[in-house]
């Protein structure tokens, strides 16, 4: 029998983490019409078109494969003959993503970040700065979830010597030197997740949380063939979770259900999974900041909590005000399960 999750029924608190894993589909869902400036979010299938990479590729006699940047980049990397081109491609991609910004109104990234607590974790494969930007403009809210960047990020830096990380505008809290840009892991079939200390640490943090997770939400991540090692690490760690028999997995993706079931079937325990195309149907949006508690109360205590969804507003100040009763409960160390007014 698996051990029960750390549910304190006297305080109505489930200390097990909710782990959210983001792929490019999450950013596209958050900003389908582009960022603050109208810049479109590129995906692997249209990276060459959106970033205008065709002239650069043609100048190096690369004339095909434009509709599948993953395979194109992997082939160029394998050949060993395109080091200059790869350097130019990587610089162009970093510059494009670095210039992207969230709009002023609340986005899915803001709602997702605020829907979780500091026991939870959001791990992203994305290079874009949207999750980092959401943290910056919501960081006065207490107990935000930890965020980690599995493929590096254009807005995150690190001091390897003193093992500190932060946003690029920050300085190391130990030596006072500016943080250095983190590497971006580009789409090759065999990525190196261990040699760079920053990337290694990010994966170790995710693995620790996965081993104890009570809920997992995989949002817009397709587990492509160029992420074989990543998928294997996720699966191995998840299978070591002692509460896996009781836990739940949510897949948020617009692809067909049978395709998603085939992709993630190794992660499922019997029927302990949901598949839907809208993040608003997820537990963290139905029970803001109380996802693990609400699920445990319904399944272990046979005492479902009523839903508590965000108000219909795109103003961050409205959302922050609405959260106050939940934040007060967290300070008091007792959760009522009552919806906000």
Image: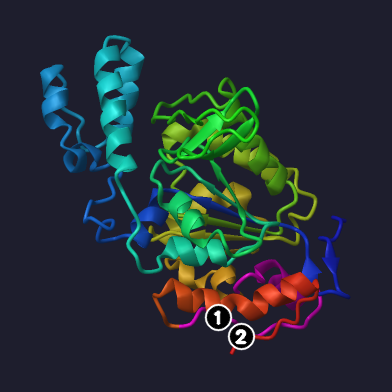
224 or 86, nearer to the observer: 86
The reply to whether discs 2 and 1 touch (Cβ–Cβ < 8 Å) is yes
Given residues 62 and 156, the one toward you in this image is: 156
Q: Is residue 188 above or below residue 320?
A: above
* Quadrant the C terminus occupies: bottom right
Examine the image and state in which quarter residue 2 appears: bottom right
Q: Would you call the spot at circle 2 few (<14 residues within 10 Å), some (14-19), or many (20 or more)?
A: some
State the image coordinates of residue 268 (x, y, percent, origin top left). Answer: 63, 54
Question: Hey, which residue is sitting farthest front in the picture?
Answer: 176
Residue 44 left/right relative to 152: left
**What residue span does the magenta drawing correspond to?**
288-311
Tally of marks: 2
Q: Residue placed farthest to the bottom in the image?
A: 341
Q: Which residue is mark 2?
A: 340
Residue 90: x, y in percent?
A: 31, 27
Q: Which residue is mark 1?
A: 322
Which type of secondary structure does the marked residue at label 1 adopt? helix
């Amino acid at each position: 029998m698996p051990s029960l999750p750390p549910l304190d029924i006297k305080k109505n608190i489930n200390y097990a983490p909710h782990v959210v894993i983001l792929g490019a589909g999450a950013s596209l869902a958050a900003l389908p019409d582009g960022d603050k400036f109208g810049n479109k979010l590129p995906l692997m299938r249209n990276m060459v078109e959106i970033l205008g990479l065709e002239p650069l590729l043609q100048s190096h006699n690369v004339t095909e494969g434009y509709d599948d940047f993953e395979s194109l980049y992997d082939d160029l990397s394998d050949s060993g003959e395109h080091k200059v081109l790869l350097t130019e491609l990587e610089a162009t991609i970093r510059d494009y993503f670095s210039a992207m910004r969230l709009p002023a109104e609340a986005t899915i990234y803001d709602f997702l970040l605020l829907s979780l607590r500091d026991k939870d974790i959001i791990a992203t494969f994305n290079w874009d700065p949207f999750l980092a930007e959401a943290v910056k403009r919501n960081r006065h809210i207490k107990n935000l979830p930890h965020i980690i960047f599995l493929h590096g990020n254009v807005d995150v830096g690190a001091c390897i010597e003193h093992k500190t990380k932060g946003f690029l505008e920050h300085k190391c809290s130990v030596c006072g030197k500016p943080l250095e840009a983190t590497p971006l892991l580009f789409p090759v079939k065999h990525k190196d997740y261990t040699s760079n200390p920053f990337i290694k640490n990010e994966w170790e943090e995710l693995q620790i949380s996965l081993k104890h997770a009570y809920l997992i939400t995989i949002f817009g991540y397709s587990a492509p063939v160029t992420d074989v090692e990543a998928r294997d690490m996720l699966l191995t760690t998840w299978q070591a979770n002692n509460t896996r028999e009781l836990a739940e997995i949510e897949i948020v993706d617009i692809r067909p259900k049978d395709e998603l079931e085939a992709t993630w079937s190794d992660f499922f325990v019997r029927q302990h999974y949901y598949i839907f195309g809208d993040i608003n149907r997820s537990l963290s949006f139905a029970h803001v900041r109380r996802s693990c508690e609400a699920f445990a109360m319904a399944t272990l205590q046979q005492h479902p909590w009523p839903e508590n969804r965000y108000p219909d507003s795109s103003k961050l100040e409205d959302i922050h005000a609405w959260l106050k009763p939940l934040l007060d409960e967290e300070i008091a160390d007792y959760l009522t399960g009552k919806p906000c007014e």
